[in-house]
Image (cartoon, grey):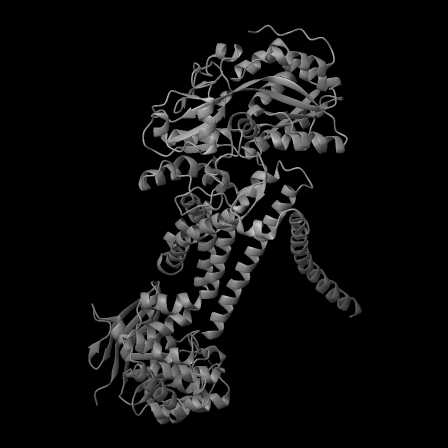
Amino acid sequence: MQKRHFIDIAIKWLFFGAAATSVMVLLGIFGMLLFNGVKAFAHISLAEFFFSSNWNPSAYGKPSYGILAMLTSTFLVTLGAMLLAVPLGVGAATYLAQVATEKTRLILKPVIELLAAIPSVVVGFIGIVMVGPFIARVFGLSNGLTALNGAILLAVMSLPTIITVAEDAIRSVPNSFKEASYSLGANQWTTLIKVVLPAAYSGIIAAIILGMGRAIGETMTVLMATGNALAMPRGFFDPVRTMTATIAIELGEVPYGTTHYYSLFAVGALLFLISLVVNLLAENLAGRYRYKL
Amino acid sequence: MKPKLAVRNLHLHYGTKEVLKGIDLDVPENNIVALIGPSGCGKSTLLRAMNRMHDLNPEAKVKGKILLDDDDIYAPGKDVVAVRRKIGMVFQKPNPFPKSIFDNIAYGLKIAGENNKQKLHAIVERTLRSSYLWEEVKDDLDKSALSLSGGQQQRLCIARAVAVEPEVLLMDEPCSALDPISTARIEELMLELKKQYTIVIVTHNMQQAQRVADLTAFMYFGEVIEFAPTRQLFDAPQMELTANYLSGNFG
Amino acid sequence: MSKYTHFILISWAIFAFSCNSNHRHVENLMIKGSDTEVNLALTLAETYMATDPNISIAVTGGGSGAGIAALINGKTSIANASRPMKAEEIDLAHLQGVNPVATVLGMDAIAIVVHPQCPIQNLSLQQLGAIYRGDIQNWKDLGGADEAISLYGRQSNSGTFVYFRDSIVRAEYSTQVKQMNGTAQIVEAIKHDVQGIGYVGIGYILDKNGAQSKGVKVLAISRSAQSTAYMPTELKNIDSGLYPIVRPLFQYTNGKPTGRLQLYLKYCLSPEGQALVKQNGYFPVSEIYWQQNEQALNRKHAKATLH
């Protein structure tokens, strides 16, 4: 009896420890980013950091540290990727979960999941030699190394996540909802749109958020395929340099302890905050909708 | 009298397994017909065949006829949506949509093209009153249907089925998941509803069949063994199998 | 590029490990830095390892900046750099107790490349600077079609980026420059962009037989608007100093090299090593750097007479 009690307590603490560890790691990372990032503002004014679009820390002349252009770039590329990937991903997930026969599903599912196995360098390279030139031809541009290129590639990269998670969510909608809908005289499509998809709403939102996380955080592909020009982008047809690309390009060569070094941590901290806010927002949104249902 | 719903030599196979072996059954209008029998005897399967729910399962093959007012619902080219609109269903486990109470009831009407807000409100109120739910939920119509108790949920499902004004109501063990008080309320509701509708109910509960059903069919291994007025079937079963089942020898 | 170089690193690590089991006193050398030099360094290391079984050399790229940072942090034996170390970098190194000493491995000409359909044949250094500063934005100002110039360059961790900015642009780059993740990507992008222009190490344009790679056109460059323009694809233009964009490729060590490190660096400067430099599309060390090299290697060194 005593021994069993001890095991119970030990296991409880073991799981608590596992949960606590991941929280600590998260806090640790954020703390480290913040601690180093804050030091950047000893030499950079907050106004310059947030409202200047000029980022050139290893300048020929005076270095500048404005993140507005890269913030816009990250936003633009992510937005574009989601505009493409959400309808496509949710559509594909719905098809797999509700329409496709078991045989079709068994063929399609592994193919879609295989998309996730393509290394991001390879996707980036495809962006340079195939998608980019294709965009250039279709839209009459001199080159395709644009925000649109990044958006398309990131959409493809986030599709497996969105499809897999959304399909699970749609599939887990109880059959009884469908039967109830059919018994009230609804056809397959009405049932799908009015009952099944709304019932899977929070799962679909989770899928989109996970896909978005993939898009915001992806580095190598955008680094290779979006041109990385420092200028403020005016739209999807301009080259962009995202926050992740900036960190990846510059962190390798930056001497420790310099303003440039700390400023990259500040960018990292901001990126972290953005992901956090997006996640909280999504959770809130999904929760509120679920309550209202 | 001509039956409202007539099953004629109905066979149903799941793959190679024959689950219904030539069923004949007449359901008179404004009656409650109970289907009883041991688990796996095919009573739920028969009920689901009555509004073509088996269409959803590619494994299930139906042969024979089910006539609604002399009109075969399995006739080739028959509009299954129209069939289901005339033959509503309440399921074993309460299955309200994860929507508001109001939207649950309005759903069937909306998909049939009814968008007039006032009219929807009137119907929602009427059906909720007729399922004795109105007083309990009238201030919470925007609340999630999932916040209701099990008994309330099942009455909501009945109201939802009734809202589209079907001619026949199929109920698949509607009280099996409910407590005795909720069960009593639903039985009361059924007796009220039969004034307007024709009801077929599957039940495991022999007392329930005796309390509500006008006619009872005893099924065993995919066949209707005996079909008679409820009182007669329970008091003086003609078949030995029926008598054995009722006396609790198996099942 | 960096994934590729990691792969190289891992392969050599495996190679080094397998060597370990056969020999007792294997010395491990680490070379890191310039992407311009990485292929050359790899060839030299491979060839040298074949002659000396007791040495194992791992080569990675990452850019000159990355190599120098690694040298300062004591994480590499040799930092390859396609630009001289900056004053701040040298200060930082001294703070860490590192004393960077440079030897010149060879010469690199930077070629200016455009799409084969571009009608321009040559540019002056002034024009090139104006293009990359963003002062000239349209090909018609250079005698081409009325199309915007699409600029390609490297990223700030690249020695070529810094060298080109400090020697040719002499101001900030235009913010419109697309910063590509490696020289190969500039070449790849130019192949698809009729309005494009880019700067690349000559090693990426010429193969071992001196043949020019297809799909891009190399421009002739003149020192001024009045003088003659020369092609970087001809060795005599480099040797004679006529082609104007030539820079030394450095190998930095911590202090004067000794032991196997010294032997390896001497090998790089030997006639055999310099032949490999040439085979890889670069040029043998120019006269003016021999004295610096001899000082660094702490002995009289016979001048390689390849050219």
Instruction: Tell me if residue B216 comes above or below residue B41 in the rendering.
Output: below
Judging depth in this view, the residue of B161 and B98 nearest the camera is B98
Which quadrant of the structure image shows residue C65? top right
Q: In screen coordinates, is B119 left or right of A157? A: left
Instruction: Tell me if residue C37 comes above or below residue B241 in the rendering.
Output: above
Q: How many marks?
A: 0
Which quadrant of the structure image shows residue C266? top right
Can I make out residue C187 in this image?
A: no
Residue A185: percent from the left, percent from the top?
30, 74
Residue located at (32% from left, 77% from top)? B108
Which quadrant of the structure image shows residue B7? bottom left
Quarter holding the C terminus of chain C is: top right
Residue A78: percent from the left, percent from the top?
46, 51
Pick out the residue farthest to the front. C226
Residue located at (71% from left, 65% from top)? A12
Instruction: Tell me if residue C113 comes above or below residue B119 in the rendering.
Output: above
Residue C131: percent from the left, percent from the top?
44, 30
Pick out the residue farthest to the right. A2
Residue B9: percent from the left, percent from the top?
26, 75
Instruction: Tell me if residue A66 comes above or below residue B112 in the rendering.
Output: above
Judging depth in this view, the residue of A72 and B121 nearest the camera is A72
Judging depth in this view, the residue of B62 and B187 nearest the camera is B187
Q: In screen coordinates, is B208 left or right of C158? A: left
Can I make out residue C174 in this image?
A: yes
Judging depth in this view, the residue of C235 and B106 nearest the camera is C235
Residue located at (70% from left, 24% from top)? C253
